[in-house]
Image (cartoon, helix red, strand yellow):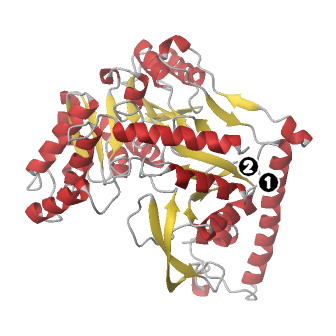
């Protein structure tokens, strides 16, 4: 065993107040081994040096530049394209661009078909070869419960809805686009969540970015987890409220910000904040971690703050009933002021929702840009959500929690399998998002390509989506995966990567 790996430290996020939890809650985030970190920095350094060399060759016309830039007659203008800011895209990302935006020509289920493509100019452009790579094991889609399908109950009901209503609505909900199927969907979502009322939106990203500005504004304070999704960050910025960021899932950091906000109030005037809104996610999609919701709720009650919970990845995927992180911890939904989630993952559809008190939903119907200006949700999409949600709830001749239980078993099995093989895995053991650490920049592209060669489709992620020394592959486990599929993925991962425990 190498000395650097022998001294590797484990950073386990232990619970500060264990009495609030009804089950053990431990998440592992292993510190990057020093030797690996040094090699990673060296790798990025070499890529940067060659990047500057290639920029020099492009500037003198020796190498062709494919990126957009100002014409010679515009050289005295204010720059339209920030050339230096595109350095990373031009010289690092472009080398491994073939790992992303791969065209799929089938349902993104447990297996999928990929359109084969090739590049003759080092990933600047791609050409389709006319061939299709069949039966690729899909470990990249958020198809947690396996409802991404073109046959079966969900597909049949969506087809029937299309025959009845058509594909599009052609109007906003507040005008002529409010269908009875939308009303049925919102009543079902409210019942599923255990709240008084709910509201559905046609786009998950806009559910956050367009509703947070309706809930907070100037004179308000937003406390946001440092790893929150871009939609939450954008919504907070658009609101005009003051934003302060606390360390990821760190309750000491959150409480310090809450205490300071109460003691000092607003800057300069020191008036009390109009409201304090805490933004967190149920499952964090890059870390595989689960929010410490019992502690967050305890803090928000103690300091009289409001809680906005984004359950995009956790709704349907956690809890004995599939009710998300609230169900997972056995908490009361009434303790969460704004419950947000998306239909794009566990339900195999599109759009998002917000649930809570009736007064909250009535307010959003008249103040949310997503409600007033956006076209209503497509009827077949609405029907897909209704059917899949009833299946999860056990109301469609199915057993309550059947699909969620299968996902939980697959998640625990796959995570245990990877750890037994020595891989460094991040996150909570119950999270279906499984980040496997690669670290070095050369491994990002190599791992993604080699997995496709082995008929496995996965997502590889690097800087700036992650810290520069924490590049990773991200697996998304589904209830539709069989044990044979998961065994195949783990064994073929072992044959390529070597960043493991000794």
Task: Identify the secondary structure beneath mark 1.
Answer: helix
Q: Is residue 276 above or below residue 218?
A: above
Q: Residue at x 34, y 52 (%)?
A: 147
Q: Is residue 60 above or below residue 347?
A: below
Q: Is residue 4 left or right of residue 139?
A: right
The one nearer the camera, 59 or 287, is 287
- In the rendering, at what x and y percent does residue 100 appear? 55, 66
Which picture quadrant has residue 376?
bottom left
Instruction: Judge the density around disc 1: few (<14), some (14-19), many (≥20) Cα neighbours within 10 Å.
Output: many
Marks 1 and 2 sit apart, C-alpha to C-alpha, by 6 Å
| Dots 1, 2 in contact, CB < 8 A | yes
- Residue placed farthest to the right in the image? 3
Q: Which residue is mark 1?
A: 40
- In the rendering, at what x and y percent does residue 475 appear? 56, 51
Q: Is residue 234 left or right of residue 465?
A: left
Which picture quadrant has residue 331?
top left
Answer whether residue 296 is visible to the viewer in this image. Answer: yes
């Amino acid at each position: 065993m190498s000395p650097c790996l022998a001294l590797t430290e484990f950073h386990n996020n232990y619970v500060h107040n264990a009495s609030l939890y009804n089950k053990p809650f431990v998440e592992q985030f292993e510190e990057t081994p020093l030797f690996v970190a040094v090699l990673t920095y060296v790798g990025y350094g070499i890529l940067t040096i060659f990047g500057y060399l290639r920029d020099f060759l492009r500037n003198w016309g020796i190498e062709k530049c494919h990126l957009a830039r100002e014409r010679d007659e515009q050289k005295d203008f204010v720059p339209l394209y920030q050339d230096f800011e595109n350095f990373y895209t031009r010289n690092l990302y472009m080398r491994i661009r073939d790992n992303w935006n791969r065209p799929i020509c089938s349902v993104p289920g447990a297996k999928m078909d990929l359109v084969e493509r090739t590049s003759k100019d080092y990933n600047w452009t791609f050409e389709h070869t006319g061939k299709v790579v069949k039966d690729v094991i899909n470990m990249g889609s958020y198809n947690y419960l396996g409802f991404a399908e073109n046959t079966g109950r969900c597909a049949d009901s969506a087809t029937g809805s299309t025959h009845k209503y058509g594909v599009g609505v052609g109007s906003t909900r507040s005008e002529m686009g409010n269908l009875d199927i939308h009303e049925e969907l919102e009543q079902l979502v409210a019942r599923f969540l255990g709240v008084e009322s709910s509201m559905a939106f046609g786009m998950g990203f806009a559910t956050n970015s367009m509703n947070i500005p309706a809930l907070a504004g100037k004179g308000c304070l937003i406390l946001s987890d440092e790893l929150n999704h871009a939609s939450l960050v954008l919504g907070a910025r658009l609101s005009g409220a003051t934003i302060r960021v606390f360390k990821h899932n760190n309750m000491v950091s959150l409480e310090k910000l809450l205490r300071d906000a109460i003691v000092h109030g607003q800057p300069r005037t020191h008036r009390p904040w109009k409201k304090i809104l805490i933004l967190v996610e149920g499952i964090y999609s890059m870390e595989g971690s689960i929010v410490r919701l019992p502690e967050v709720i305890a803090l928000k009650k103690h300091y009289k703050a409001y809680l906005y919970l984004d359950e995009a990845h956790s709704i349907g995927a956690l809890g004995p009933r599939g009710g998300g992180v609230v169900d997972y911890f056995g908490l009361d939904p009434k303790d969460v002021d704004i419950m947000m989630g998306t239909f794009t993952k566990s339900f195999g559809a599109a759009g998002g929702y917000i649930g809570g008190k009736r007064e909250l939903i009535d307010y959003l119907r008249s103040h949310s840009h997503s409600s007033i200006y956006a076209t209503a949700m497509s009827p077949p999409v609405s029907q897909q959500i209704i059917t899949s949600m009833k299946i999860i709830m056990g109301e469609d001749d199915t057993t309550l929690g059947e699909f969620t239980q299968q996902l939980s078993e697959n998640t625990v099995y796959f995570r245990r399998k990877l750890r037994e093989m020595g891989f460094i895995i991040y996150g909570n053991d119950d999270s279906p998002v499984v980040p496997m650490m690669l670290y070095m920049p050369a491994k990002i592209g190599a791992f993604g390509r080699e997995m496709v060669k082995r008929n496995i489709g996965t997502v590889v992620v690097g800087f700036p989506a992650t810290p520069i020394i924490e590049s990773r592959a991200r697996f998304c486990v589904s209830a539709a995966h069989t044990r044979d599929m998961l065994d195949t993925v783990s064994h073929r991962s072992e044959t390529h990567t070597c960043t493991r425990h000794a």
